[in-house]
Amino acid sequence: AHYVYRFGGGVSDGGKGDKNLLGGKGANLAEMAAIGLPVPPGFTISTEMCTRYYEEGESFPDSLRDEVANGLAHIEGITGKTFGDAADPLLVSVRSGARVSMPGMMDTVLNLGLNDATVEGLAASAGDPRFAWDSYRRFIQMYSDVVLGLDHGRFEEALEIAKEDRGVHLDTELEAEDWRRLTGRYKELVEEELGRPFPQDVHEQLWGAIGAVFGSWQSERAKVYRRLNAIPGDWGTAVNVQAMVFGNMGETSATGVAFTRDPSTGERAYYGEYLINAQGEDVVAGIRTPQYLTRAAREAAKAKAVSMEESMPEVFAELARVFDLLEAHYRDMQDIEFTVERGRLFMLQTRSGKRTARAALRIAVDMAGEGLISEEEAILRVDPAALDQLLHPTLDPAAERKVIAKGLPASPGAASGAAVFDADTAEKRAGLGEKVILVRIETSPEDIHGMHAAEGILTARGGMTSHAAVVARGMGRPCVSGAGSVSIDYARRLMRVGGQEVREGETITIDGASGEVMLGEVATVQPELVGDFGTLMAWADKVRRLAVRTNAETPADCRTAREFGAEGIGLCRTEHMFFEAGRIANVRRMILAEDEAGRRAALANLLPEQRGDFEEIFRIMAGLPVTIRLLDPPLHEFLPHNESELAELAAASGTSAEAIKRRVGELHEFNPMLGHRGCRLGITYPEIYEMQARAIFEAAARVATETGEAPIPEVMVPLVGTRAELGIIRKLIERTAEAVFAETGRTLDYRVGTMIELPRAALLADQIAEEAHFFSFGTNDLTQTTLGVSRDDAARFLGIYVEKGIFERDPFVSIDEDGVGQLISIAAERGRAVKQDLKLGICGEHGGDPTSIAFCEKTGLDYVSASPYRVPIARLAAAQAAL
Ligand code: ADP
Ligand code: MG
Ligand code: MG
């Protein structure tokens, strides 16, 4: 096995396809050299060496010495300089480089190979002692910091003192003699700290740096970064050793970083910064303010300092040529590092540039237009999850903000409004046209109408999967959850934070993307859904096979979803309508009724309301399928939970508070998730489902008459575990349909289906399919029932499970393919074996998750259903899955 791969001088032992072996930096250095770009020669020690280094107790095999010696000889041959030569020394940089760029790894060491003898040679050969001593002091400081692990604070202090002694402010004002003196001081510092002198042997320097790169792979910083970014520990890093070129050789030298297009807007314009007479990290370190690359950028920023285009027109033209060449070669926007040494350009790095979602869209669409990539490639270039950033209003970056608290970024988007502390007030004030932010300690299903009325939601407690977070994401409302420093006083209608009081009606702003809470109104910018977005979505729609529906029940959500391209409703949760203010009383009366007659009386009041809701949904979704789920949650969720609500209900319904309390007690369940809910309600209280079915068919009939276009309702029965359950309820639905058809004199097409959310239903899908036109996988519950994990209680251990690798991902975010996914595959197969045209879909949060959507494509489902704001994400993810 060999471990050293050369590049430069017409030789490239590797290329851009070798990232796993050479790391991203090494692979692209070799590639750039291969296509004839000016890259200082060097060699890469492969990631395999890193693995072996750790296997062999952090030591190198002897053979590596020879290989590195050969690598050095390769550089020496091209540069004509010799490493350690006192007359004309070769200097190198030692750079780490993993497969993916990884903060936490060792920083680069520049100017390696300098010592008390070679510094004189460098001064003489360059004819510039100031440059030589500047380089030496940089080297000692970097090497001491990065390789020897000394605190750089004392070095900076010494530099400050040196400047003070000379009465100057800028590094550039120091002269050769000053740098020489400072170098002496640096060496003393090293000896004081380390108890031995700074290494003068250049080979010792080199091996120290190589060891430090490999050593940094297992540093705490690197481990933490890997854990957070799911980077496997066995990838290892490569080490790049490369001949130095010098941007600090005076006014004709410079160093810079650039993007081939604007990484924040995607505009096709060179974008970057450079510094004259500087080295490497100076540009990012902020010691001096970097200057603009192009004249246009300088003029736009009204900056005075001259741009590279103006100060070095010839080198800039060469650089621009390289930019275009690299883009054409890599067929993507590049992030580039370069150095100019006495008017000569050198390329030091290139990689695909990071970009905002907006830029990603624009670049993908532009590049397809330029013929650089195909439409399919453009589709694959945009991360669906990143679209989320684009669909919501965001804070105007130029606006001033006064942050008073920080919570979790639970649901993206920014919103301003009057702080209100209960759902009813939110609904009331919003009804009067006021923008409100609902602020709660935490939210529950009873707050839904208020959450809906609000522009945004802020909670003091709860995590990323709390009720508030999940519901807000579903509704597309911005949400900041778990802002622990906010204390809320419901009685006095105010919140306190950091010694400040915010009363009901005072304006606050929340940013659900950052978790920040601000005082007053902060300007927002609206998303742009046309242009590039529309173009890419149209391309995606051409290639995807999966249909995309939405989970929605309010007219507003249905409209939003249609605008976002939903092709129907996959899940309309009827209970959300029950929670609406003004209706809950009838719902409660129904629950409290002593007998069927009482229940029927209360249900009769609910019927016109439900029918009205369905009519509106059918109108908005004209021509598209609408799946309506019959009542699912246990009845006690609708009952009052506190004394004041109890008293209110008693007064309104003419019963005693005692009687209500008794009923609440009767309905209590130890484990409601597995209790009296779903179709079990329909079996025990058929009149509830009967009312809902009637509302659906009456609404459909009315809309059909009114518009001439008959909707196709899909009635969905929740929590079915046996064929018999579905059989009973299907008959009830059919009976009701026939009755309505007879009354209205109008027969409509409709379907009856079920959710598959119990493992038993999945396993016995062949039997259940006999009774169903369609299956919709309710993967929220199916995950709970398959894993035996309650989503609401999982927060205490799920994080640790993911961290320990027990779960690869949060199974409530991305489908557990091995377990839950297997049940879905089984159900799909067995169901279709019985009924070939059985329609299969997925609802639940997974329907909007790109990884899960890829699984749905693989499994051959017909559609996914996602919350309105995730519809575009699902469309793009479905297209990517199909490619
Ligand atoms: P990072 O991975 O942090 O970007 P690099 O290894 O790219 O670290 O090094 C940072 C900077 O150091 C480069 O952008 C370049 O300016 C400078 N640098 C690295 N190697 C050389 C070299 N051989 N000659 C001149 N400058 C170099
Ligand atoms: Mg770099
Ligand atoms: Mg369910």
Image: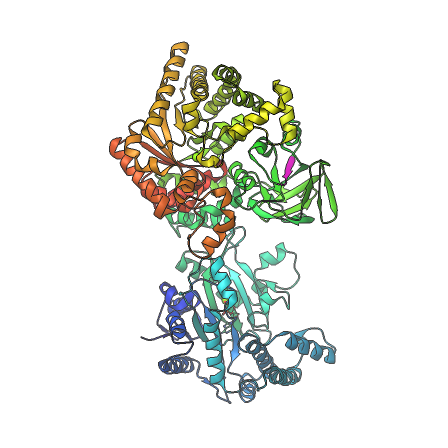
How does the figure colour the protein chain or chains? rainbow
Count of marks, rendered view: 0
Q: Which residues are magenta?
A: 436-441
Quarter of the figure with the N terminus: bottom left
Q: Residue 421, relative to residue 409: is it above or below?
A: above
Q: Is residue 843 visible?
A: yes
Residue visible at 33% across and 75% down?
Answer: 2
Residue 234 in the image: x percent, y percent? Answer: 40, 65
Q: Is residue 537 visible?
A: no
Residue 769 left/right relative to 435: left
Q: Residue 335, relative to residue 176: is it above or below?
A: above
Residue most extreme to the left = 833
Residue 491 in the image: x percent, y percent? Answer: 71, 35
Residue visible at 49% across and 65% down?
Answer: 222
Q: Nearer the viewer, residue 684 or 353?
A: 684
**Dominant secondary-structure state across the stretch colored magenta:** strand
Q: Quadrant of residue 31?
A: bottom left
Residue visible at 73% across and 77% down?
Answer: 164
Q: Nearer the viewer, residue 416 or 571?
A: 571
Residue 592 in the image: x percent, y percent? Answer: 54, 22
Q: Quadrant of residue 682?
A: top left
Residue 412 in the image: x percent, y percent? Answer: 55, 44
Q: Quadrant of residue 72?
A: bottom left
Residue visible at 67% across and 83% down?
Answer: 178
Q: Nearer the viewer, residue 662 or 287?
A: 662
Q: Is residue 877 magenta-colored?
A: no
